[in-house]
Amino acid sequence: MNFTTRRRLGCFLFAATAGLAWVLDFSLRVRLRRVELLTGLTLMVVILLLTLFNARKKLPFLPLLRASTWMQIHIYVGLFSCVLFGLHTGWRIPRGAFEFALALLFYLVSASGVVGLAISRWLPSRLTVQGENVIFERIPALRAAVRREVEEMVVESVAKSQSSTIADFYEARLRNYFSRQRFLVYHLVGYGKPRHELLSEAQSLDRYLNADERGILGRIVEKIQAKDDLDLQAARQGLLKGWLFVHIPLTYSMILMALVHGILGWKLS
Amino acid sequence: MSRLQEFGFEKSRYERPNQKWVCGRARDGQCCLAGPDEKGNCTATAECRPLRKGDRWFCSRPAFMGGPCPDGPLSDGRCCREIPKCSPVRSLRSWRGLTVLLAVAITLAALLVALGSKRGNQVFSPGPLSFAHRSVSNNCSECHAGLEKPAARWLLADASLHSAHDNSQSCLKCHNLGDAPLQPHALPPGRLKTLARTTSGTTSGDRPGGLVLASFIAKPGHPAGQDIACATCHREHRGEEANLKKITNDQCQSCHSKQFASLAVGHPAFTDYPFARRTRIIFDHGTHLRGHFAEAAVAKLAPKLCVDCHQSDLRGGMMVVKPYETICAACHDDQIKSKAAVKPGIAFLGLPRLDDRNLAGEYAIGEWPEDADQPLTPFLRLLLAADPDLRAALDRLQGADLANLPKTDPAKLKAAQQLAWGIKALIFDLGLRGQEELIRRINIIAGRTLADQEKEGVVAFLGVDVVRDTFRGAFPNLSKEVLDYRNNHKSAATQLVPSPELAKPGPVKPVSPDNWVSQGGWYSPEGSFAIFYHPRGHHDRFLSSWMNLTVDAGRTTDPARSLALFKELTVPKAVGYCAKCHSIDESTVSQVNWLAFRPDPAVHGFNRFSHSAHMSLLDPREGCLTCHSMTEAPAQGKDSYASAFATGQHDPAQFISNFRTIDKAVCANCHRPTMVRDDCLLCHNYHIGRFKRVMAHTAMGAALPNSPVK
């Protein structure tokens, strides 16, 4: 099944299920039945089903469909849960403190899910455009390796030219740059101005350097670009992983509160 | 540009991001092979773990760490390149797990605090109550039975205690909705079924799509006869501004057997709106407009506009009739005060002519005026009937000519004797005890104790002088005669002490008695041996009280004679002409309609309409006739307005109106989806019945300081 077919099938199933839910909700409301209990219970089951995706990821050895299939189910069931939530609340923002907090959690979980889906669709292709694709966990080590290489080049330049031009430039502009992740926001939004400014500064040294130093500076410029590419990878891969720091913890908080809400709703209805 | 990372087991290490701990030197690219253990302790000792082949040790450092070292393992098999311990750090996955735990812990703590708090009810309240219920917003148990603080107990409470039906009982503490408050439309079981069966309107057009859809999917939530909880329709906790009465047309029709799309499309035509019964006051618009008001003598007094006779009620919803004095008195006052009547007054008590030849000896009746010739008035018959013996005597004398009694019929003679002595005793008792005697007898007749207002009405200021003066000439020795008779005939009802005042001569009245009462009251024509009552005008309490007393004759102890009196008071051209305009209803309770329709705020009918809201929309020329068009009904005959009020026709539901039923199209011209609201609740009430407002029952003593009465 190709991507287009999969998406069409997913959209169709989502629309059909959401439509069916709406028809059921409408019909039961017309019949003056307490439909909130039904939509609430269904929503709870759907949310638990969504959390199973996380559990499935921790049990990769079990033959329970492919992770990508789970992901598709997670996406469309997640969208369906938004429809169920709307039907459950009557498309209104709850006014009570507890219920508002619960609704807020649902909004945040849903929004973070949508944002996560969007960035997981948009960022990977962007990551292939600039720099080398590296494993996220290796980035700190690679960044340290680049720094060591640059420091060796600086020492080499001093030894060869007896001049501290490159060393001074490193001390003034590059030490801090190579020591840690820089320009996080610029990398997230894809704005390359700081990189170009730094490269421009480095290249402006060229007139003060002899031939050996120019060769060394050329290699340093390559490392500046490599470091910037690593920072970009780190920023964007970090975002790909970081949104789950919102999505997952808030999901569990929401489930806890939803349980209390469900018990109270059942007891008082 | 050279590649930053290499892949392959000899070129790069295998990353395990799912592990909780990561080597502390990983950030610098100096990660060892051993890595941290499960608890985050560094397990590193050396760069490799040498391998033994035969009797030699070989360095096993992988290629991506530089391959075998030049020095090789020590002779005892240990690696020669020991590495210092590091401080392992948590992996990203581990931090995420910790974040989840933190979030769960914070949520749990917040829930526990809220559930255990005294203000937990406010936290867990689904939302602010509506404005009308604001006063109970801090106490959940006022509406949710058994919900006490703290909120944690709610989780453990028995769910069966808090059903919507139980909670409805809390609503009914303040909202009086009759005897069947939770039944559909608050109507008693069975009543709705009868109404649905008798509804004559038929729907047209297609059923609304929503209802068709709903009918396929679910049955009505509340089968016929089952109670409906208040919360089914009234959804609380939606804020102060929330409309608790909001309900859709589809929901309204969900239980109805006849379903339609809107007022304009499908709603049954009005068959009996707005007139579901005849008018309480008999007023034929047709004969008045076409006949009486056109007469020259009346033309000047006749109203010119509808609003000369009609006005809106205080709420502006209904049009009511103005007071009698404003709209009727100019023409009808003389009739009521009997100035233009055939008879000036109505006979109350009078002495009939008795057969004095045969009523002698064994049947002696004592003194009886020879010239007495009054008929036995219905009032007298009824007052005598308070005595069971006399009631039997009156029955025996039914149809007999009292002036010519058959000598051969001793039973009739005996009855006539009892009647004569009964009349004497009544006059004696009235003279002696006055109005109290009258009331005593009426209480016996009514089978109950009259209220003060009723007593005042039936007695109508009847003075002792009128009684004594009227009958003094007829019975000069009444006191002695009655006492002697009672001594010989023990009658439990009339054991009274004679009044010496009766023996005294009364003052001579120089003024004609009927002139005395030109404005109403009691009089006795000269030598008539009878007491008459002259109505005082409209709102005459005497006539209205006697009519009220006898209208439901079946409830009195003597229905036949009560009915006879009632007929006497209501025949055409009876004194006072009460029944000329005031119709009489006989349904579950018989009553004289003394008042025109007045909207009762406690009564909630199926329909509602606001006249004041529509006044500015009327066609200037048509005015009220825009909606209320008159019929061409004849002035007389079976199809006339008057036919509904013919003698003996007391069913208010049988009538012919002066006005046509309102055409639904008149309403639907404006009330349609694209123009003005046309939802069910705009014109219809759900709760039907007479619901009095719930009042506080505060003991008066509670107002006193330190009172034990609270």
Image (spheres, coloured by chain):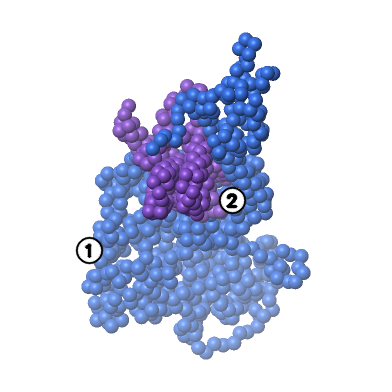
Chain colours: A purple, B blue
The label shown at residue B632 is 1
Q: Can residue A23 be seen in this view?
A: no
| Chain at tag 2 | B
Whole-percent x and y of residue B191?
A: 45, 47
The label shown at residue B330 is none
| Chain at tag 1 | B
Distance between the alpha carbons at the discs numbered 1 and 2: 66 Å
Whole-percent x and y of residue A103?
A: 50, 48
Looking at the image, residue A104 lies above or below residue B375: above
- Taking depth in this image into account, of A72 and A49 the one nearest to the observer is A72
Say which of marks 1 and 2 sits in front.
2
Q: What element carries label 1?
A: loop
- Residue at the far top in the pictured view: B54
Q: Give the residue number, with chain letter if any, for mark 2.
A: B124
Mark 1 Cα within 10 Å, few/some/many (few <14, many 20+)? few
Whole-percent x and y of residue B42?
A: 65, 32
Quarter of the image that includes the N terminus of chain B: top left
Q: Can residue B206 be seen in this view?
A: yes
Residue at the location (59% across, 70% down)?
A: B452
Residue at the location (37% across, 47% down)?
A: B250
**For this view, does A25 lie left or right of residue B231?**
left
